[in-house]
Amino acid sequence: MTPARQSPPRPGRRNARAAAPAAPAPPAAPAVTPPAPTRLDLLRTMLLVRHFEERCFELYSGREIRGFLHLYTGEEAVAAGVTAALAPDDAVVSTYRDHGHALARGVPADAVMAEMFGKATGTSGGRGGSMHIFDVSRRFYGGNAIVGGGLPLAAGLALADRMRDTGRVTCCFFGDGAFAEGEFHETANLAALWRLPLLLACENNLYAMGTKLAHEHAVTDLALRAASYGMPAWSVDGMDATAVALAARQAVDGVRGGGGPYFLELRTYRFRAHSMYDPDRYRSKEEIARWRARDPVTALAARMRVDGELDDDALKKLEDLAAREVEDAVEAARAAPEEPAADLLRHVVSPAEEPA
Amino acid sequence: MTGPGTLTGGGPGAPPSGAPRTVTYREALREALREALAADDRVFLMGEDVGEYGGGFGVSLGLLEEFGPERVRDTPLSESAFTGAGIGAALGGMRPIVEIMTVNFSMLALDQILNNAATLLHMSGGQCPVPLVIRMTTGAGRQLAAQHSHSLENWYAHIPGLRVLAPATVEDARHMLAPALADPDPVLIFEHGSLYNTSGELAPDAGPVGLDRAAVRREGRDVTLVTHGGCLPKVLEAAGALAADGVSAEVVDLRTLRPLDDATVVESVARTHRVVLVDEGWRSGSLAAEVAARIGEQAFYELDAPVERVCSAEVPVPYAHHLEQAALPQAADVVAAARRAVG
Ligand SMILES: Cc1ncc(C[n+]2csc(CCOP(=O)(O)OP(=O)(O)O)c2C)c(N)n1
Ligand SMILES: [Mg+2]
């Protein structure tokens, strides 16, 4: 983690001119940041995501999954570390590269896999697919396939919590490409202005599709620019799960404590192409190999080994467990029923409004 | 509003008792907002200049003083962010009312409205209803030139997942908001800029109106005039002129632009056998085109004359008064079209 660039705290803007009626009752127990994750916790999550993504790659090649598929391979430390800092009642807003966020958040692998198979047992009954995983029971408000489109939404979730004083935090994942969108800048300003409990988790993987960071941003120091909106903004080694977890905990605690939004630039890299459509022509094999040498999963396992927390047997067991969970999900998805086409028009409007 | 405030109000409402009050459309909207803010502490209003300024069109004047800056929230100029924040706050348990100053600026929030508000319920397999109300001014007629004069409610009426309302009377201005807030899905309310200063009578004990039916604003036998929003006063004026000439025109106010109430339109056409569609939108791809198609599908054999349309000329709305008026549907155009239809 590089040193924090903090701007001085801004005075609150709560000088209500007239007393507002009592806010609706907040959720029963105020959200509390969970205890710091162990390295084993982080490793388990990362292994699940890694196995899931690599299996999706095969399934796509075997034509069992279709549509757009954006894999998270290489970026696992970000999802594992950031979500470990969130309480069950906190909210997450994700992107089209959302499997890793969903799994790390505890969305069951079989429901995510079934969604990609377009099955009735999928998180959205097959209406969303890979890019639109939702699980409101875990306050996972979706993969959003419009670059930057989840940011205003996340600010709104945070606004609801701030107005009701719930102590909850909303975490929004987005990429370096999204940082160039107006929606990022509008949201950053709004969130800082209203001191919303929002964690802006920017996954800087150095590319927006095929466009290099330096070809999309005049100033490539994203944390520096985020700080200019009046929020603490840190750059973090996104290939180091423990560093991510530590930074995320500090940021989430700051947000939960009423410090307004925090920005984390998580420096990472995707090992696979942007999507399954992408021939990956814009970066060299050498560059990819250099980053693969910093594989966040192997790196964490290696450090645990050095510290005597892990041996070959234990690692093998963890790998097998993750592989088993993914394989079970695949089998269940294959066997699952399809949503009946007669239900095509369900969920366009809420049930009370549906024509009889 | 001038014109006979008669006939069906489009939904349940107790018969008036006590003296009706005369209020402006703007006051009716403000009363509705005040009532909603007082009734439910999940409701809040946000948008550009809704607070200290009192609303771009003065609708929310005084509400900041009454309800405070948490619930009457001035936002920065960032249509996408505050509209999206309304969506997120709705997901988070609130009942936001987002005011976008005018439909012209809503283009900057179109992504949030189309790709989030209208799709989240479906993409999430029913997990994410978005109980959000978005209000905006629409329409031309005040010499504001091309960029401030659009009528684009038909674009929004194209989108599954949204409900689109166009209150044209003080009664609808006053009473559409509560049922809109009670709707579990996103509702867009288009307020035509020419209506704010119009006035009409409001029954003291009228309740919420229905949002599913068009309203017959004037009964007639010879021709049906279908319209919505800011064109209603012009169409009622045309109906008056036609009556003076012995042509009995029925006026249907669509009120809800999505979902369209085909039944009321078709039923009227089945009685009059002639129809004129009046729409301030550009003719190509207009709401009038959609209504014409539905009449063609459902009432073709009832027609004794081709469907007539009176729409805006296909030109960016010009500034100069005479040019602007030439571009917009006028009562005289409606009269002429009705005469052609009646033959
Ligand atoms: C508004 C919008 N513009 C363009 C696209 C096409 N697109 C999808 S992902 C992407 C790159 C986004 O890059 P980044 O935000 O860095 O996220 P990453 O894919 O690297 O995780 C683009 C251009 C889109 N989906 N939405
Ligand atoms: Mg990127």
Image (spheres, coloured by chain):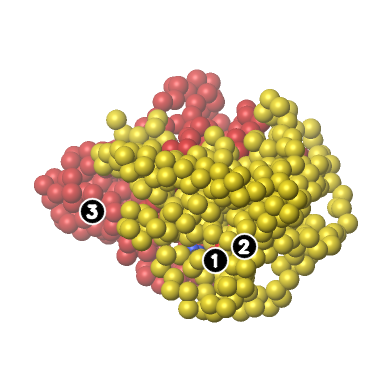
Chain colours: A yellow, B red
Q: Is residue A197 left or right of residue A153?
A: right
Using the rendered image, report if marks 1 and 3 lie on a common chain. no
Q: For residue A295, which numbered disc appears in the image?
A: 2
Q: For residue A174, which numbered disc appears in the image?
A: none
**Residue visible at 45% across and 21% down?**
B14
Query: Which residue corresponds to mark 3?
Result: B293
Q: CA distance from mark 1 to mark 3?
A: 52 Å
Q: Residue furthest left?
A: B301
- Tags 2 and 1 touching, CB below 8 Å: yes
Helix, strand or loop under label 1 = loop
Q: CA distance from mark 2 to mark 3?
A: 60 Å
Q: Which of the two discs, 1 and 3, sits closer to the camera?
A: 1
Query: Which residue corresponds to mark 1?
Result: A271
**Residue A132 at x, y = what percent?**
47, 50
Cβ of disc 2 within 8 Å of ligand 1? no
Which amino acid type corresponds to the residue marked 3 in the rendered image? Answer: Ala
Q: Chain of mark 1?
A: A
